[in-house]
Amino acid sequence: MYEKLKQVLVEEMSINPDDIKLIGDLGFNSLELADLVVLCEEKFDIVFKDADLPGLLTVRDVVDYLEANA
């Protein structure tokens, strides 16, 4: 799931692949996080719960969420 998420971050959000670390902080503002959520919902056929969004701080957090809910 990490590699799939990394591909989304690189291709859709234009993030340098060298900047993506599994335990790295996403460093996203609320708009960027919303964009990532929409992309993940489309790519992985998942629906994020609004209450869970504040807990998505690292790449690992997003990967774990996707694995648990996909």
Image (cartoon, rainbow, N blue to C red):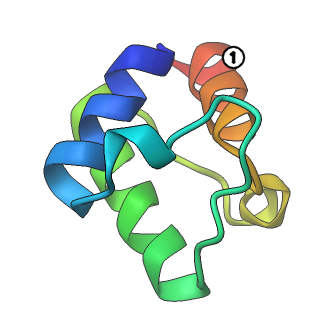
Q: Residue at x 61, y 15 (%)?
A: 67
2 or 16: which is nearer to us? Answer: 16
In the image as oriented, which residue stretches furthest toward the left?
11
Q: Is residue 54 above or below residue 66?
A: below
**Place of residue 52 in the rendered image (x, y in percent of width and height, measured from the top left):** 78, 55
Badge 1 is on which residue? 68
Question: From the viewer's perspective, is residue 42 above or below residue 33?
Answer: above
Q: Secondary structure at mark 1?
A: helix
Residue at horizontal 51%, vertical 41%?
A: 20
Q: Identify the image quadrant of residue 44.
A: top left
Answer yes or no: is residue 7 visible. Answer: yes
| Residue 45 shows in the view | no
**48 displayed left or right of 43:** right
Closer-to-camera residue (58/68): 58
- Residue at screen point 58% across, 73% down: 28
Location of residue 15 with respect to 27 vertically, above or below? above
Tell me: 8 left or right of 57: left
Percent x, y for residue 6?
A: 38, 32
- Horizontal and vertical percent position of residue 13: 26, 61
Residue 26 location in percent, x, y? 63, 58
Q: Residues within 10 Å of mark 1 (few under 14, many from 20)?
A: few
Amino acid, disc 1: Ala
